[in-house]
Image (tube, coloured by chain):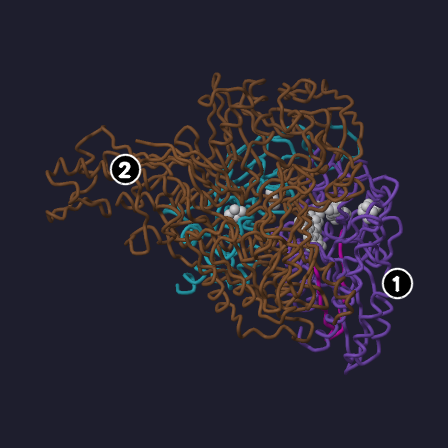
Amino acid sequence: MPRIVRTKVEFEGEVRERMAVVEEDHITPWGSGTPLRIVGRSYPRTGGVEVVTGKATYTADVQLPGMLYCRIMRSPHPHAEIASIDYVKAESMSGVRAVLCHANAPGIRWFGDSLLFDRILRYEGEEVAAVAADDEEIADGALSLIRVRYRELPFVVEAEEAMKPGAVQIHPGGNIVGGPDGEVYRRGNVREGFAKADLVVEERYETPAAVHNCLEPHCCVAMWAGDELVLWDSTQHVYGIRNEVAATLGLPLNKVRVISEFIGGGFGCKQGVGKHEIIAALLAKMTGRPVKLALSRRAENLAGGVRHPTIQYLKAGVRRDGTLMALQLRSIANIGAYGMGGSEVGGPIRELYRCPNVLTEQIAIHTNLGPATAFRAPGYMEGMYGLESMMDQIARGLGIDPLQFRLLNYAEKDPMRGVSYSSKHLDKAYRTGASIIGWESRPGGQNAGARRRGFGMASQVWGGGGGPPAYAIVRLNADGTADVLTGTQDIGTGTKTVLSQIAAEELGFKVEDVRVTIGDSRAGPYAPVSAGSMTVPSMGPAVRAAARSAREQLLNLAADLLRVLATELSVKEGKIKSTARPREVAVGEITGRIGDFMIIGQGARGPNPSDAKVRTFGAQFAEVEVDVETGDVTVLRVAAVHDFGRVINPLTLGNQVEGGIVQGTGFALMEERIVDSPTGKALNANLEAYKVPTMLDVPSIESHPIDLPDEICNSIGAKGAGEPPIIPTAPAIANAVFDATGIRIRSLPITRDKLLEEIRRNAAF
Amino acid sequence: MSRSIPSVRALAVRKRGPGKVTLRLQVNGEEYAVLAEPRRTLLDVLRKDLGLTGAKKVCDRGHCGACTVLVDGIPIYSCLKLAIECEGKRIETIEGLSFPDGLHPLQKAFIEHDAFQCGFCTPGQIMSLKALFDRNPHPSADEIRSAVAGNLCRCGAYAKILRAAQAVSEAHAKG
Amino acid sequence: MRPFEHVDATSVSDAIALLKAEPDGTIIAGGTDLLDLMKDGLASPRVLINVKTIDGLDRIEADAAGHLIIGPITTLARLAEDARVRQDFLLLSEAISVTASPQLRNMATVAGNVCQRPRCWYYRGTFDCFLKGGNSCLAVGGRSRDSGIFGAAECAAVNPSDLAPALLALGASVVIENAKRRREVPLESFFTAPQKDRPGFTVLGRDEMIVEVKVPKQPVGSRGIYLKAMERKTWSFAQASAAIQLSRAEARVTDVRIILGGVAPVPWRASAAEDVLRGKVPTGELIERVAATATDGAHPLGQNGYKVKLAKALVKRGLAMLVDNSRS
Ligand SMILES: Cc1cc2nc3c(=O)[nH]c(=O)nc-3n(C[C@H](O)[C@H](O)[C@H](O)COP(=O)(O)OP(=O)(O)OC[C@H]3O[C@@H](n4cnc5c(N)ncnc54)[C@H](O)[C@@H]3O)c2cc1C
Ligand code: SF4
Ligand code: FES
Ligand code: FES
């Protein structure tokens, strides 16, 4: 019998209390002693053949008979009111099937008081009108026939400007989200802490707006089948989209189906519903035909979401012996016109080190820019750059080795609640990473010549514990194969592969006999958003529970048929074994005997431990070369040692870690949305001027996950690994640049112009 | 729509468009006739008219590489190539790569070494590498890197892409 | 992209006659810049004249005097791989090897490359700047990180080509044809600062076509180098670059050309720096002096001061490498 419990679930740094319906039975976690055959081994990805042959159908590839293409007209101004709009010519153009704009669209509420198609446009790139036509060229042609008269309004794009009294108001509630000090966290008394410190350092750090730029843009195809809506969607959450679309359009939940089989990247920007899904659904309704809507790359850069830029005022106080006495942060996040709020920039400051006095104020500010959305480890990545740059600076100031300084302030218990961790091996990560990069034997940094080597390091802390609700179903077929069904999705992290391993392990089947069906809200039960590093720790235990239920039913049946006790039976490699008898029986022989009667196992993710804090940890070490004449920065090596609990698939996990480091390198050295302040418009809304790393920009990466199961966090002992690897890369690189040059750049990305300017200003070299 | 100017009419040239014209294209060894405007790019013809959606549209500007296909054996960005200029040329896409007896060694290596995450860049990566290996069956690591320098992978699977291609190169070296 | 007619030209005279007859006609070569501009509405020709169908325009050959003759539709990739080029004009191969990406080098042509339009983000974006008929240059007082430090009159955009500085360092010229005549223009006078209604960087008339690029034979033992700094390791335009061709007799420099890319509306010839070096023995100290002179007359804007230091560094390093024999 299922029962309902309360449990704490952490999502992207925020803890929420949730109700969870859980299975009665507690499942003993796979511990370090549990012999596992499949979990822990490298398996190539399921779906790999489709991907490498070009046959994988992403939403962008869906083509339906009679399908129309939708194109969006977007605001050319950062802030304007539509004085008039004339779309008659566009509507009457041959091949145009429907036009939507504020003049004819239903008054669907969107953000606060604003509408899906609003008269007021609050950022460059906001939706003005949409055209559905037989082809994209026609739709584009029609857009150029729509005449809009804009009344331009004063605008503000800089967060600190938008905070000033008298600044342009973007929403009636003002530009500052929440109170004037934003979200406040306090422990101890920072004033006293600073008073007791021997050294107090204050710095200002800045991080840029980074654009996800998933290669597959936000994209959907909407099709009505009677009164039911089928939506192919490039999303990180099929169930979430189902729920939000149904609520927005006033449809029963069971009349919306969301399908997302292959997804060309998400990184956080495809978590929730966007205007495009609703627009496509409305146009499909108006025309009676399927409608495809894919954002152009420019739109993706203007309106597809960004990591919010931050300004961080960070103050730290330490004793001469290296004891951290106080940490204080005031962070200002520019969340654009429709960002939901700031992320947990203060997270690392609150929880990485043992520090008695901490104050963090996280402020989120609306401006006339595109909406900020979550981006891989939101907040923590930005905050970690400030914090770990500061720690490096202080350690050097005190003459203590930066690694030693971190160990001195190591938190054995969660500094926020004082509880124990379900597991923590950060100390081991530090030592392993140091030995891989050669930390102890590194040259002193004071090397001469134009090309200088430097070493830097930084830590990582993040959630990744996942939690309920998450469900799965395992069905056994007559031939001894199994189907796993759940409403999760694979955004490129290898979810499908990992879940098939977990199911096969628990069932005692071969991996190839287990098929996982995901990415369809109608095919499987509820599963959480693929974000917050929560897919594996949420879905894994649910799948294990479902597989366990199926296995128990199978063994009971086998016991009946073979006339032995179920407790004498076990399954291995698809064969049922008895301790009493030597003969093995293939699973198919048993399931075959019951024909079309089916064994169906159901599983749910249980609650999180109430008395332990679940975290992932890690450390990265970087070696860089800086050419102090040309300003070239080359990241030579990165050693990454993370603790995600048990490793389920070393191959796909390694890929996640490397990918995080690549994106982290981009964030450190080149990625930045650039806005022209006088006009409030973006200058680099494309993949040429917005730089992301290429094959030639990536360092050689050595990744050694700790791979010790966390026996408290959940039944599979694994935590999430999607976000942690991106967190420490930028500060590790920034610290290495300092080590090489003696120059500290406190504003990411560390570009040539900043570096050369700083070198000139210091008359260095 | 077409204006006739005497001096031009006298020339031995053929103007086509701006409306739809019949394009004859040879893709993956098969002949196709497509009705399309001259402004249609090769990428759009492949994806929309021929249903070959392996090549992806990401930037439509030569900034990403996801649309890479081979024209007469040479990798190009199909989003910056007019289809009308590909008549009489040999066009190869990822769909034509699989061998009758299974997968191309590069495809196998990509799976074995996990050389992708979301897979959206993968067809483009493989086509760039295919052109390299056709020319040079045993490329060095640097040659491999340079060959895919025009193919972004936002997931950052570069290390594994390199590994996969190196594995194919080493297999060739061994014979 | 607006609809257009498409013509496969079969001879140079066809193409030129078409250009003359069609005021809205434009040559399409590799199309890598033109189609980009057309998709953004920055160019909207009614007729595209494809010159890739003209026989013989992709030749790479030497004339009787040993000068290199390059057909206009030769792709960058073919030029870089050509055995003669690698032997005698390695500077070109080097410049091309750091140009754009492999796929773009397979598509882009030599003539198209020297005719490409500015990359200034105000120009490529949705801004009404001077170059697009607006009142003023937005880069000068705005985001000027990528703008020029030399020779900006009304527009501070830089010539984005890598091939152009290399060709200039070799003393190359282009042969241009229109309906009336054929003329040879040294590249040094081919490039101009962009002007209103002529956003290109060249003196080419709209009814003219480049039919040849000519690179003079270099003295025996003359060697060149191309150094380029970009925002990432590849597939980016130059923040600054230096193309240097150096000839020596005994230890003395008999001739040198130093051309800077990415710093001016034209490939910028550092004549004063060349003068410092010519006739002398290039010691380390002299090279420092040459490099220091290379940016004489620079007028950096608010955000591109780094280009001064960078250009000097590239010149110094390039010369040192050439002198060191550490490069061929
Ligand atoms: C992402 C990206 C990165 C790039 N990076 C670099 C780089 O690092 N370095 C660099 O140098 N370039 C770079 N480029 C620019 C690229 O090299 C040019 O787009 C290319 O060289 C243009 O050649 P094309 O043959 O494609 O020209 P087209 O686009 O066909 O034509 C360009 C112009 O030249 C005219 N034209 C072409 N041929 C002739 C002729 N024979 N006579 C008269 N006019 C003619 C056309 O009418 C048109 O106006 C990059 C481009 C992109 C998209
Ligand atoms: S530099 Fe030239 S193209 Fe750029 S804004 Fe100024 S005038 Fe326009
Ligand atoms: S879609 Fe062609 S290069 Fe990006
Ligand atoms: S695998 Fe996702 S972009 Fe390369």
- Please give the letter of the chain rendered in brown: A
Q: Is residue A255 left or right of residue A730?
A: left
Q: Is residue C93 visible?
A: yes
Q: Residues within 10 Å of mark 1 (few under 14, many from 20)?
A: few
Residue at 10%, 38% (x, y): give it: A563
Q: Is residue C225 magenta?
A: yes
User: Chain letter of disc 1?
Assistant: C
The three-letter code of the residue at mark 2 reads: Ser
- Please give the letter of the chain rendered in cyan: B
In the rendered picture of this protein, how many numbered marks are placed on residues?
2
* Residue A169 horizontal/vertical position (percent): 75, 33
- Residue A2's place in the image compared with C325, above or below, is above
Q: Is residue A574 magenta?
A: no
**Residue underneath mark 2:** A549
Q: Which residues are magenta?
A: C211-230
* Residue B51 horizontal/vertical position (percent): 51, 34
Q: Is residue B70 visible?
A: no
**Residue underneath mark 1:** C297
Chain C: give its colour.
purple
- Kindly state the secondary structure of the residue where label 1 is placed: loop
Marks 2 and 1 sit apart, C-alpha to C-alpha, by 80 Å
Main secondary structure along the magenta-highlighted residues: strand
Q: Is residue C47 left or right of residue A17?
A: right
Q: Are marks 2 and 1 in contact (CB under 8 Å)?
A: no
The mark closer to the camera, 2 or 1, is 2
Residue at 27%, 37% (x, y): give it: A549
Based on the displayed image, in which of its 4 quarters is residue A489 positioned? top left
Residue at 85%, 39% (x, y): give it: C133
* Residue A151 horizontal/vertical position (percent): 80, 27
